[in-house]
Image: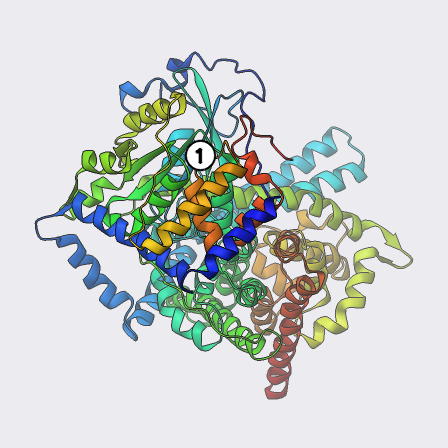
Amino acid sequence: MATPLPTPGVGRAPTESTDTGGACASCALAPEATRLARLGLDPGRYSHVVALAGNPNTGKSTVFNALTGLRQHVGNWAGKTVARAEGGFSYGGVGYRIVDLPGTYSLLSASADEDVARDVLLFGRPDVTVVVVDATRLERNLPLVLQVRQITGRVVVALNLVDEARRHGITIDVRHLARELGVPVVATAARRGEGLPDLLAAIEQVATTDDPPAPLRLVHHDPELERAVATLADQVAARFPSLPNTRWVALRLLEGDPGIEAAVRDGSLGDQAAPTVEAAG
Amino acid sequence: MSTDLLEEAARLRRGLPDDVGDRIVESLYTDATRLAETSVDRDGTASRLTVDRALDRVLTHRVWGFVAMGVLFFGVFWFTIAGAAVPSDLLYTLLVENGHAWLRDGAVALGVPAVVTGLLVDGVYLATAWVIAVMLPPMAIFFPLFTLLEDFGYLPRVAFNLDRLFARAGAHGKQSLTMMMGYGCNAAGVTATRIIDSRRERLIAIITNNFSICNGRWPTLILMGTIFVGAVVPPALAGVVAAGAVIAVVILGIGVTLAVSWALSRTVLRGESSVYSLELPPYRPPRILRTLWTSIIDRTFKVLRRAVVMAAPAGAVIWLVGNVHLGDASLAGHLVTALGPIGWVMGLNGIILLAYLVAVPANEIIIPTIVMLTLTLGAPAAGATPGVMLELGDDAQIGTVLVTTGGWTLLTAVNLMIFTLLHHPCSTTVLTIWHETRSVRWTAVATLLPLALGFVVCASVAGVVRLLT
């Protein structure tokens, strides 16, 4: 059930991961990003796992390529990435493993690619989830952001395609958005490398913090539903004491989500709250 | 004890309205809308949106959309065919004629045993050289052009145009997207069907994906179109007619996809069509240099490497079956004689069918395999010695070889183009289909159905042509 994520600390020792200046001598990023070393497919030893989520066609693969230095083909259409792609980079001498998830509009598990994305977020428990968002279509992208935020507080929102938004005369109040979501929001134009240094800094900050924001509590205006969620969430918390996102799990159980029900039945839901994640094959 | 939790959830759920799932989603979207409204400020006239809208009005028009589609794809193929001619000739002269002669002379001068020279130089090297000369130029032009169209955002528009047709065929609209993916690689197209939720519609998409011409098959079509179909009209029109022939096969492929989808959804895979939304991305000006670079690295070299990797052992196999003798003829001779009658019925020949057996791992090497088999088998019959490739002379172009030595006609070329579209998927795709369906039965259907169709269509075309002439 649990999607295996790479286990931190496993793998070959880095040969030159601290010597990041040399590795980035020819990279296209601004000078302040020289702390970045792109490690392509082979991250060597790494300390943090970063998951890349987002709606289809928001530029996830472009961000992935910009960070890893890989040249995964980027298509201008929804549904290009259906499986997971993985790569690595080193920032500030620390190794990161990055997983590019299929683009999904929600985590409600309606199709195989949504399942892949949700399992990684829920059971793989990445150290940082970067949600790549299309700035020109914020309204359509926010439901996914809110769903991810309900699961975890270790989130960075990459407000991508801001160059396109500018051309369309759209401006977005980044600070307001960050305040409302309770996590860093970084404006990027990944195609040109714009905003990537800030994105890296935000990823580092969220990955290293000992005190991430709590999962978002969305209040349901329907009192009946709210009562049921609260009751069930208490019981979920009693059964899985270390689970951070009890309300979200309660909601899924109320909906009768088969994936979550199975995870309750075989106890793997509790694994996600365990201190270490076992890579299961 | 964990089932208590599930029972409690079920109990609470009974106390809630039936549409609790919808209410939760609705609540989520209300929050998202509020947050978006307070964060986004739209000012100025969105001029680019207007351009997008105007473009979409034409490119997704009921009628003009199809016209634009035809013109764009026609342009791409014409450009490929016209542009590839000169570099292909150069590579041919360099690698196949001169390179092979030098290597052979070198091997003879060094006193290398004839068997080793045959296997390595006449087999492995020659097959590899053929693959590069035949495939590199058209791919280096076609893939960047196709990628530019993709980056521009055109492919989803094609999917949008075709969506209505797929709905009428009882298939999922997203199948048009997986079909587009198949035009690159069928194995990738089959994997892409994961975006389709319903198993019924997903199986239809998997089975019909093979009717999208993949990377490995474009060169065969383009080559056949150029040297045979283009050659029957005056030279001024050759490029246009050749491109038209390739387009015709692509359209036939779309037609077969729709027909097979329709037939499957009316028989073994009956059911309702799902509703879905297709997002049309904004048109983005492609970054031309970057696109050229990535499409040459990502597609051209990847496909070429696969072809070369497959061609080298295939070359050895071809040389072996051509030179290992059983009784009065070579192994290849026996096989070709055995396959000959079926080939004749299909308007092809035994050599072509044997080539398809050798080339199961990769469609990329079909043409080189056919040419090499024709040379090794055809030439001794014409009275030459086994070291045939050297005696062919300067104008040993593919077309001449196939016509004079192989006895090809226009019918052979046209039927090969049809068979290129309608035959079993390559072994990678078959493996992917099994992996995605986990069903031997559906894998067998997806593998054998195209082959059966290919046999029927080729045999019908051959029969009609033979009746008329």
Give x and y (percent) for residue A182.
28, 33
Image quadrant of residue B460? bottom right
Vertical placement of residue B13 versus B310, above or below: below
Q: Which residue lies at the image location 44% right of the left edge and 12% below the top edge?
A: A18
Q: Quadrant of the C terminus of chain B?
A: bottom right
Vertical placement of residue A128 versus B345, above or below: above
Q: Which residue lies at the image location 31% right of the left edge and 55% below the top edge?
A: A222
Q: Chain of mark 1?
A: A
- Residue linked to disc 1: A244
Image quadrant of residue A31? top left
Closer-to-camera residue (B108/B37): B37
Q: Which residue lies at the image location 49% right of the left edge and 60% below the top edge?
A: B196
Vertical placement of residue A270 versus B343, above or below: above
Kind of residue sitting beneath label 1: Pro
Give x and y (percent) for residue B205.
53, 64
Closer-to-camera residue (B428/B84): B428
